[in-house]
Image (tube, rainbow, N blue to C red):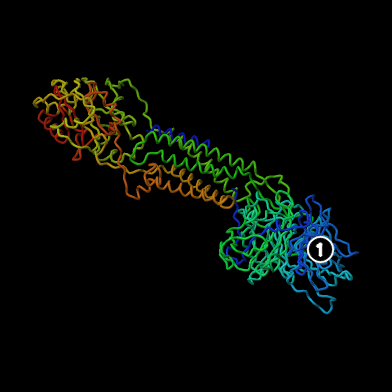
Amino acid sequence: MARRCSLCRLTLSLFFALSWPWSSCGQTISTNLPVPPLQWINLTPHLSGSAPPPLMYASIGYDETSRSLLIFGGESQGGYPQQQTYLLNLDTLTWSQPTGPDGLTSVPSARSGAIGGLDSGASYRRGHILIGGKDANGNGLSDVWEFDYDYKFWAQVTVSGDGPSARGGASGGIDFQVKPVSSPTLPAPNTTFYLSGGSSGSNLYPLSEVWELNITGTLSPNDQSVVGTWQRVSVHDSLTPKIYQGGAVVGDQIVSIGGCNSTSADDSCAQQDSYVITAASGNVIAPNACPAPRVGPAVVANTNGDSSSFNSQVFVLLGIFNDTLWNDDGGLQKGEVDVLDINGGTWARILPSGDPDVNPNFPSPREGAAALSYNAALVGPNRAAASDTIVFGGRGVSGNYTNEVWLLRAYNGSITQSNQHWSGYGDGDLQSGAGADGTGVTIQYMTRCAVALQSSVSSYPTPSSGPASPSSTSTTATRLDTSTLHKLLPPLSLGLLTIGVLAYRLSSPALGSQANDQHVALFYGGTLLTVLSWGIGIGGLVVAFTSQKALAVGLMKRSTHGPVLTTAHGRAGIALFLCLYGLVPLLMAVYAGWRYSHRHSPQGESDSPEVPTGGRARSHSRDTAEKLNSPGAETPPLSGRSTPGVGHHKRLHSWGGQGLFPALRGRSGRRSSESHADTVTSSGPQRSFEVVNRPNRPRHSSGNSLSPFSNDPNYQRVPIAPRSLSDLSWLERRRSLNAVGELDYALSQLGGGAASTPVTADIRSTNGLMNASGAVDQFQVQSMPPAFEILIRLLFHLSLLGLLILTLVALWYYAPIAGFAIFVAWTAIFYGLLLILSWRGRPRGSVLTVVLARLRGEQTVPSTPSRPASSFALDQYPFPTADPRGPYIHQPQVWSATEDYASMSHAGPRSTEEGYDDDDEDEDTRQRRIEDEMARREVSIVTVPKRRLWITNPS
């Protein structure tokens, strides 16, 4: 088992040695901002007549008196601006092209991106104002035109004063609810239009360049004396240049949202910033960013009069954005309407109800749709029950233009929470068409703002003081993106790694249990999963760098030098990756190699007998249980006596010295216990047996000395001729006590007078004499791993936890909520299983397992193997053995004292090296000394045929 565990650790070490992008935005969002119940309704199937072609960036207007919706200009599918005028009668839902009176056939030139709005200064001037725009060459226009709704003709407005340069794509317009200004100095009531920013084709103008156009005069077939006067508005802050942004006017406040700060119209150039400029004071508000940055959104005022809080709200509709740079949680595909409170700077992302009769139920994302809001329902029989925003045309994400007409109907009511039932909810049966009355309509609040994917810039430009001037170059910001493969591989790698960790922990036996084949299968299965996860993790990192795209948001050019580790996600991810997939495996490999090189092995051994100086032949115990049970280093052989001299040590008590604190001896202290048989010669001290430290064990009296063998499976009735101390002749023992040894002599004297014992069966094992499992009722307390190993494990788990958290954050911001829920559930299950396994003692080498076991106060009883480790060696030799070694076999492992140490009884020294001389001692004194010596010794004597003595040394 130990060998297999070492192989397991080495395999894991070798594996480890070979072995979503996110950004946290400081955005705020409201989930209880009061909004009216909203529903999208597709009017296109209900329309008839000669409809305009698919267009984007057309000019839109509405006249309540004639109930006409006007569409002029716009860019067609071919990319060319148009100059046709279309009217939609909202009573009959019929399209038509107007024809003016004879002689009034002048029309504005083809254009797109013009500013427009209703001019209703008097009954003799009710028309649609058209300001600027871009021609077929992309150049700006500066002329001003007005369409008369009564007589359906166009007339050019006479403009005076220094006005803005030619431009298109600006923010502005008019709030139709603001009453015209009457003055005695003016020939007619005055209406004011606003213009902010824009582009001349080659230059961009900052949003802080604001102009107002005051319109007055008369418009009729007989009198086209409409006059406009430009006036510059002073703005305190300098704002960024913009084009293709969404804009609206609420009172005298100009709202600009999204758009680009370059002349390119690619969706990747979109900015997330928004500004509210108050023309009267010149103050600028920059609300916190929240919706996804869009190109060509439609922005309209919330004209529903059910609540006074609606008066300061604008709706942001449609537009397109780059979904590889931003994640909007699928809101735009579900008809998302973003509501901005321009006074408080608060955003709410709303998902309205859809049209149940069409598929899809919501308008698809589109750029450059023309939108207009009114304070009553534009279509349907019950116009007072709601206010409508009508949307026309636009260009979809795929590049296809459309001429669809959609209504965003805001019913009279107020909702402050998701799925709230308002007064008009009715039976919940959602309706469609112009006559929809709000039954079944409700909304849902989205709970977070859109999130940038690997954005290297933290925010949008902020207002700054100073003069504003046209800019031919734009500020740039870089955003990064990677392939979908990178977003998939890291979570998959971590999932497989956690499964592999669980499998490896299950493969380790619990405290007090043994390993089996199932544990081996779990180990190799966990190793395979870990190797696979390591490879997938490496692949995910490689894909992240190879597929990284750096987009210059201002110039729309791919960066020539890809930024490396410019995001918080990238820096955190690479640090944790290098730690988990690099540093930890390296440390584990180094640690495993160090343990392998310092593993304990027997030092130089020889199977041949050694013949030391003095002519004593020694036979080392190589195959007996003494060697197997004591795999430590060999002990220098003991001599029967030591001659006092320089450096001679006094003998130690059996309860002190090296036996008291064996841990202080280090590894070298674990010594093999071996028996040495010395040839009895006439010269030199001799040793017939060896006395060693003895473990606690049950005592057996000599009279019942065979009882321990009654259940011994190794017991056999095989006659064997073992050696006995009695084989030595009496004369040989009497000749020299030094030659035979003190104890041998005493034993022979004690046994000489004993009666012969009954014949006792020979046995092949002495297991019955010893406690096979060691000390009785001796518990083990599981110890902590080494400090360096604890450090490696702690580093591994901290790195794994960090990557799991990083992945969860990425999934929360960029993945479907189901993917995040699955991963967070598995993470919780993983750590729950780790805790449960440790509580149940698996694996037994785990730090957490040891800590929990100690907290519970549990100790572990070592399991008894089915066959003692020493039984094989014991069965090879009979007891007592026929070889010329002493008769003692001891268990468990002990070490024999070196020649510098000798034993003393607990009462005092058993013998001393100094002061004894056999020649000066008479027989009675020697006999009395031997008897006293034997009285202090605790021995159990087992007799066998031919007066064989078996001597064991219990404590």
| Residue drawn at (37%, 28%) of the image | 603
Can you give x and y, in whole percent of width and height, for residue 870 in the image?
29, 29
Q: In the rendered view, would you say 761 is above or below 537?
A: above
| Residue drawn at (59%, 55%) of the image | 24
Determine the image quadrant of residue 270. bottom right
Number of residues whose C-alpha sits closer than 10 Å to that of mark 1, classed few (under 14), some (14–19) or many (20 or more): many
Determine the image quadrant of residue 688. top left
The C terminus, quarter of image: top left
Can you give x and y, in whole percent of width and height, for residue 568 in the image?
60, 51
Closer to us: 908 or 66: 66
The answer to whether residue 331 is left or right of residue 768 is: right
Q: Secondary structure at mark 1?
A: strand
The answer to whether residue 740 is left or right of residue 88 is: left
Residue 580: tell me if it is visible: yes
Residue type at tag 1: Ile
Q: In the rendered view, would you say 603 is above or below 553?
A: above
Q: In the rendered view, would you say 440 is above or below 456?
A: below
To which residue does mark 1 refer? Answer: 131
Closer to us: 191 or 267: 191
Can you give x and y, in whole percent of width and height, for residue 529 in the image?
49, 38
Closer to us: 909 or 609: 609
Residue found at the very far bottom of the displayed protein? 184
Can you give x and y, in whole percent of width and height, for residue 100 in the image?
86, 64
